[in-house]
Structures are given as C-alpha cells and as structure tokens.
Image (tube, rainbow, N blue to C red):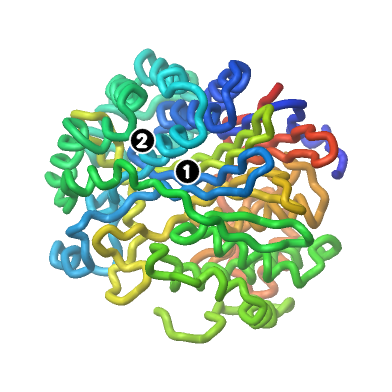
C-alpha cells in the first residue's frame, strides 16, 4: 500500500484491531460503534447506524426507502438481501399513461413511490442475524428524532440546495423547512413522528409499518395524490425482503460480489471485466479515465436496456459477463477517441447512504439504504411522518421493455453494496454512493485499491469522473491538462460544482486480521473501530 502524503491535508485511513464501522455521518458511526462496544455484531451495529441516519440524514435515506445488503458470516459464503419495494398491483404502463404520464415518471409523482422495502429488509436481517433487541438498536435514532440532532455541514449544504423542491409539498415543508428555510449547519432539527414510527417498529416489527393504522394512513395519503397503492400492496410487503444468490466476477485474482438484478451491480462487474484487459497500473491519468469512461458507457448502455426485475431478466448476468460478450465490448474501445456505446449483440433499444461493518467475530456487512433523489419524492404523509422515496421513477413507460412498470414489479435500482474476497475469504465490504454513479464508482474505487495499490482513504480521495448521458462529468480537482487531453479525444467535459458521490470501505488483512477503514471526505462521516 502506498504511503500517505500528510501535506495534502487529507486524512489517512483508519486502523483498528478487532471491529470497525464506516458510515457517511458521524452520529451514525458513533451509534454503530457503541453497539459494537456493547457486544453487538455487525448486523446489530449496521441497523443501529442505519436507523440513526434515517433520522439525521433525511434527504438521503429513511424508513420510506429501499435497502440492499451483502452479508458474509465469519467463514461463510456471501449472501445477498433484496429489500427493494414493488409497484402496486394496479400499476401498468396503460394505467399511468391514462393518468397523463408519457415517457417518464416524475420524481414528485405518487407513481414514483413503490411500496417501501427498507423496513422489511431491516427486520429480515435482524431476525436472521441480529443478536440485540431492536429496542436497544434504535435507542439513539429514537432519541435524535424525538429530542433533535445537530445538522452537519454536508447535510446542511445539500438540504439548502433542495429547499425549493421540498417547498412544493406542504407536509414535507412543515417538517424539513422549519421557519420556512433549510436548517443551517450546527442547528438542531427533530422529527417526533419518526420517533413514534421507529418505536413501533422496534416493538412490533415490520407489521407496524406495513399493516394497521400506519399503513392505512400512508395508503390514503398516496391515493390522495393519485397513487394506485392499496392496503393489500403494503401488507404483502411486510415479509417482502428476500435472500438471493449474489453475482460475482474475478478481477486480477480477486472475487467481486454484487447483488443481482434488479440492482445495477451487474454494470459494475461488466466495467471491471472490460478494464481487466488493460494495464491500469502504468497508464497515464488521461488514459485511465478514458478507459474507465468507455467501459462505463458500454456497461450503462446495457444496464438501461436490459436490467430489470429479476423475473424479467433471468440469465442476464451470465450472458453479459461471458467471455464472448466482454471480449466483443472490450474490442470496441479506441484509445484515441470517444465512441458511442452499443449493445454487444446489436439489438435496437431506443441520494443514498452506504455503510459497512466488520465485527470482532469476523462477520462482515455491506449495507445500503436510499430514498433515491434528494428527499425522495418529497411526498410526506402528515399523519405518520413517513417521507416516501422516488424509486419508481426508474421504471420505463414502454410496453415490452424489461424495466416497464407492472403489477408487483421491482424497478431497476442504482443502489448497490459490494464485497471483495480472495481464495474464499472475505477481504472487504465496500460501497459508493451517488445515484447513477455507483456502478462506475465501484469499478474506479476497486481499480485504485487493486491496480494502483492505494490505501482505502487515498483511493476514495482520487478525483472522480463519470460518463453519463453523453457528457463526461469531472470534479474540479482533476488537473486541467488531463481535462484537455480527454477533450482532445472527443469527450464533452463538464466540471462539477459539487463532489461526486461518497464511499465507505473496511479492508481485512488476511494475515493479521487488522482492519483498515475509509470514509469519504466528500461527506460528513468517518470510520471508527476498537
């Protein structure tokens, strides 16, 4: 691992000997570490941290969102948990077009709200692998929701940027724009109704959210906004989270594990497989970004055309990760110029939190929870205090498309936890936040760690770039000469005025079991352990 340069002003990786948690919010990290110190395991700590973050980072996550996880019990295989919600039984392309929608589902539409899956996922994960009562795990979160919490700097910045959007919903504005404006960094904010919901879930489990008075209120509110949701849709989701087989591919002798579709983890694996055919350790920065950009364009083109509910894309991972597909795609990369993407078999096709934990027993959790856009759909039920996500906006309104909205379908998801292993032993839970960027971010982060021998924090701190929708977005820290070299190859460059994504990771030394953790400096969080 390369040595840390303390003159940069960046922090180095964190090291600990027994257990560690890394999140994007200091209060979430503290809550998880408290549970680890009290003898809780990785799942206990992850749930405590996620519950806190659902309160203190409301624009990114919440109980009205969705969740995915990869869990590796000590010495056991990696397991994948799909906690994404489903569309209402009455949701069809025809029904939404009859309601006046055309090509897309708007972020603030009630049709963008699939039945939230996070609570079901939390309760399934806890029932199968938790060791402490939910009442204990939610203590900090309930306290922050009830008594208030200090707003951190990055949260305040993003909150202010979303103020106009929040103001479009009177109920969301009442909670999130106290005194008519977004809270400033260091001010106190509370969500007492959310405290009630968390206490009910801790005492009664998932039915407290998906059945009874709370579910009836949420359904009534969504229906008042034009939604097709029913109490039956919510009741079916109570035990909707399910364990599934992860997908994986090799990269330079390591095994990279992702959740299968309907998540975009397959796109991350495709990027890595394409990049494996090039020497990223010795090439220039411009060459490295160009390669990553071209591989990303190819993978995302397939993602948008093909990834959908698992029932609608069976066998897709095997097909797209095959040697035939990858070699064909890799051959399409021209080092001298940017090219438009194409599907390998040529058919015609027209905001989030991540955390990871390793406990003293060696159990590893890679966990992601999201409401998609900043403040999700911005639709908040005033009776329950639940802010709904906007994940249904990912559905397509094209009959016959794999990701077309349909009764009980799960949409293509951008949120993806990751796990790295070698020779059957888990080495690192990791993840990258940032909406559409996440699959590209997984590949870039792993390449930094594996190809360039960077420490976790150093790999996270590298200037980021993202090819999406015909533009190569770059952070301002990318040197001007590199930008010019990329523009000369035909890339349309856009310099971002805000950081691109965030990330967390914990690496386990296979020889000493020492833990190295990193938490992205683009966010407020940290990695801590003991």
Q: Is residue 72 above or below residue 383?
A: below
Residue nearest the observer in this picture, 146 or 484: 146
**Left or right: 158 in relation to 492:** left
**Left or right: 398 in relation to 259:** left
Q: Is residue 364 above or below residue 178?
A: below
Which of labels 2 and 1 is toward the front?
2
**Left or right: 111 in relation to 189:** left
Where residue 498 appears, x then y in whole percent?
A: 55, 45
Q: Report whether residue 397 is seen.
A: yes
Identify the residue under disc 2.
63
Badge 2, how many Cα within 10 Å: few under 14, some, many 20+?
many
Taking the spot 75% from the left edge, 33% from the top edge, the residue there is 515
Where residue 72 appears, x then y in whole percent?
A: 61, 43
Taking the spot 52% from the left edge, 50% from the top edge, the residue there is 80
Taking the spot 64% from the left edge, 44% from the top edge, the residue there is 76
Badge 1, how many Cα within 10 Å: few under 14, some, many 20+?
many
Identify the residue under disc 1.
352
Marked residue nearer the N-terminal end (2 or 1): 2
Distance in Å between CA atoms under marks 2 and 1: 12 Å
- The answer to which quarter of the image holds residue 383 is top left
Quadrant (top left, top right, bottom left, bottom right) of the N terminus:
top right
Quadrant (top left, top right, bottom left, bottom right) of the C terminus:
top right
- The answer to which quarter of the image holds residue 199 is top left
* Residue sitting farthest toward the top: 147
Where residue 155 appears, x then y in whole percent?
A: 48, 32
Taking the spot 58% from the left edge, 36% from the top edge, the residue there is 523
Q: Report whether residue 497 is seen.
A: no
**Left or right: 171 in relation to 306:** left
Q: Which mark is residue 378?
A: none
Q: Quick check: marks 2 and 1 in contact, CB under 8 Å?
A: no
């Amino acid at each position: 691992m390369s040595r840390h340069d303390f003159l940069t002003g960046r922090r180095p990786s964190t090291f600990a000997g027994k257990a560690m948690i890394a999140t994007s919010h200091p209060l979430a990290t503290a809550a998880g570490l408290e549970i680890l110190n009290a003898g809780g395991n990785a799942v206990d700590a992850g749930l405590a941290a996620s519950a806190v973050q659902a309160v203190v980072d409301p624009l990114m996550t919440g109980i009205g969102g969705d969740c995915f996880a990869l869990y590796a019990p000590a010495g056991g295989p990696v397991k994948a948990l799909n906690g994404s919600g489903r569309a209402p039984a009455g949701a069809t392309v025809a029904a939404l077009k009859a309601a006046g929608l055309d090509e897309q589902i708007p972020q603030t539409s009630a049709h963008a709200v699939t039945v939230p899956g996070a609570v079901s996922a939390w309760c399934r994960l806890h029932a199968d692998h938790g060791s402490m009562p939910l009442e204990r795990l939610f203590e900090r979160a309930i306290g922050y929701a009830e008594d208030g919490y200090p707003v951190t700097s990055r949260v305040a910045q993003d909150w202010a940027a979303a103020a106009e959007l929040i103001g479009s919903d009177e109920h969301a504005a009442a909670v999130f724009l106290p005194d008519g404006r977004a809270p400033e960094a260091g001010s106190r904010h509370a969500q007492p109704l959310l405290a009630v919901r968390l206490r009910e879930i801790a005492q009664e489990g998932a039915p407290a959210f998906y059945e009874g008075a709370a579910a009836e209120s949420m359904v009534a509110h969504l229906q008042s906004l034009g939604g097709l949701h029913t109490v039956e849709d919510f009741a079916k989701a109570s035990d909707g989270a399910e364990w599934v087989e992860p997908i994986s591919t090799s990269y330079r002798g390591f095994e990279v594990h992702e959740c299968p579709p309907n998540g975009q983890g397959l796109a991350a694996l495709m990027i890595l497989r394409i990049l494996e055919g090039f020497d990223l350790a010795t090439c220039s920065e411009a060459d490295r970004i160009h390669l990553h950009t071209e591989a990303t364009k190819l993978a995302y083109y397939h993602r948008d055309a093909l990834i959908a509910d698992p029932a609608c894309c069976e066998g897709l991972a095997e097909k797209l990760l095959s040697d035939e597909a990858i070699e064909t795609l890799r051959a399409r990369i021209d080092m001298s110029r940017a090219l438009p993407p194409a599907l390998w078999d040529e058919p015609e096709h027209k905001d989030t939190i991540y955390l990871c934990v390793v406990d003293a027993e060696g159990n590893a959790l890679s966990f992601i929870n999201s409401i998609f856009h900043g403040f999700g759909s911005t639709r908040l039920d005033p009776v329950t205090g639940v802010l709904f996500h906007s994940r249904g906006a990912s559905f397509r309104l094209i009959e016959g498309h794999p990701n077309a909205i349909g009764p009980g379908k799960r949409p293509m998801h951008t949120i993806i936890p990751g796990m790295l292993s070698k020779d059957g032993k888990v080495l690192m839970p990791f993840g990258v936040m940032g909406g559409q960027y996440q699959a590209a971010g997984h590949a870039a982060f792993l390449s930094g760690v594996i190809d360039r021998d960077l420490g976790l924090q150093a790999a996270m701190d590298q200037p980021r770039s993202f090819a999406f929708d015909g533009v190569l977005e770059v952070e301002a820290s990318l040197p001007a000469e590199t930008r010019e070299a990329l523009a000369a190859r035909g890339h349309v460059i856009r310099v971002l005025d805000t950081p691109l994504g965030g990330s967390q990771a914990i690496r386990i030394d296979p020889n000493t079991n020492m833990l190295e953790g990193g938490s992205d400096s683009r966010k407020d969080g940290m990695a801590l352990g003991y």
